[in-house]
Image: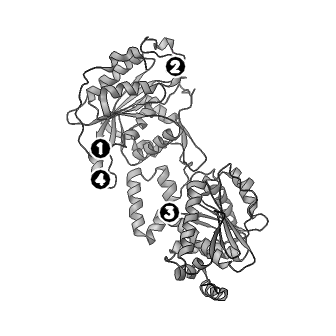
Amino acid sequence: MSNISQIKNLIISALRDVDTFVDSCSQIKLRDYQKGVAQAVVKSVLDRAGRSFVIMFPRQSGKNELQAQLETYLLTLFYLTTSGEMVKISPTWKPQTLNAMRRLERVLSTNHISKHIWTKESGYIFRCGSARIYFFSGQPRSNIVGATASILLEVDEAQDVMISKFDKDIAPMAASTNATRVFWGTAWTSRTLLARELRAATKAQKKDGIKRVFILTADDVAKEVPAYGVFVAGQVARLGRNHPMIKTQYFSEEIDAEGGLFPPERCALMQGAHAARVEPEPDKLYAAALDLAGEDEAVIADPAAGTADAAELSNPKRDSTALTIFEVDLSTVDDPLINKPTYKVIFRKEWIGTKHAKLYGDIKAIANLFDVRFIAVDSTGVGAGMASFLSAALGDKVLPFEFNTRTKSDLLWDFLGIIDSGRFKDYQPQDQTFWQQIGFCEFEILEGPQKRVRWGVPDGTRDAATGQLVHDDLLISAAMCSVLDQEDWSISAPTFVIQASDPLDDLDKGF
């Protein structure tokens, strides 16, 4: 189809409104909750009203498909105008911007009208006649200054774009044109770009009554898509309704209103009804998690020379080695929605300033006593040596875990999922040291799309009542049940085999 007048007639007949265009020219139909968004944005564009919209949809509910359909409609609508430009920003180039371009290309290529008129330029520009959309990355160091949005400025996953980046490089793109602005995303914290724009849009909406804020939850989507409700129910069963990812990704709730990582309702979920034990019970399954003393404490520890006495340590009470023994309850593995075990803490032990030679022997003896199926071991820094010797003694029961910014953040999210799904239970009466560490734990959500969090008891924290230093070794050890949770617990426990030679004999080689 090359005749311009034919194309123009098709456009005029199909572009009465965005719903008609999508329904008649594409392979999908917009859901009711998508239609309201599309109609509001298009009206602002056509009226040159320059409104700012905030669209918060749950994950996998059709936000990105709606974006591509809306962009295709506007490109086609402005096909014969003298000019018209849209700009779309995503937090990263790869994969988010690339995915957005691939999605638009698919819609443009399958729409009955746009497939005849679109072309791609310079790898990041899509054009229909005089109308163009530019795709950029909103990463802090991206060079995107100079683009202009005369029709529409979109910021996708706006909760992951830094406010400073938006204010300096992105907002000016619509300044001279009063273009409509749309901020898409999911809830995170009250300090994000999305949250700031939500407050501004809500204020403007209250002032003139024109709807600018569209916030959906999983329950709203499930009314139109029952299968989505089933999917989210499975996620809730696995992670718990109060898990940060469930609250933000599916129910559009900001998480910094929680009052800390361990608010009362979460602490209540952690309380078990069982007692602590110092020895195993018949027919029970056990696992362990070991958080080793940090670099500061172990810097002069030399097992061969035996120079790790507490008196010799540079700061012996800064950190300790903590071991947690769990009874692994497999009853929740049979639940088709959860399919993971429950971890009941039954024993804890701390070592402060203990020589690594003795530490190794103690840990091995306890692991043997409980015949643990797995033991997660902190293998960070000097911990690599201990993990290696334990692996030689206990074989594939040892699960090394190296701490860094990413892995510690992931550990927390997984641990909260175990707690919020009711799968972490502590013994009674309460271990006051452990619960003190829970109470003093702080967290900081870091900027960026990785959803990382920095957490723990800050160095130098003291209990105001006693003046004693507060650490987080028992808390970290407990959280390492998340490492155990990655294993397959559906198979029978392996038989423990004593090694012919004990690696302790080789300690003179050093760690």
Give, as a three-letter code, the residue at label 4: Asp
| Residue position for label 1 | 489
* Image position, residue 197 (x, y; %): 66, 59
Q: How far is mark 4 from mark 2, CA to CA?
A: 46 Å
Residue type at mark 2 is Val
Cβ atoms at labels 2 and 1 below 8 Å apart: no
At mark 4, the secondary structure is loop
Q: What residue does disc 3 label?
A: 217
Q: CA distance from mark 3 to mark 2?
A: 51 Å
- Where does the C terminus fall, quadrant-wise? top left
Q: Which mark is residue 299?
A: 2
- Taking the view exactly as shown, the residue that stands out farthest to the right is 176
Cα–Cα gap, marks 2 and 1: 37 Å
Q: Residue at x 28, y 42 (%)?
A: 329
The correct choice, above or below, for 252 with respect to 131 in the image is above
Residue 394's x, y, as percent?
A: 30, 28
Q: Residue furthest left?
A: 282
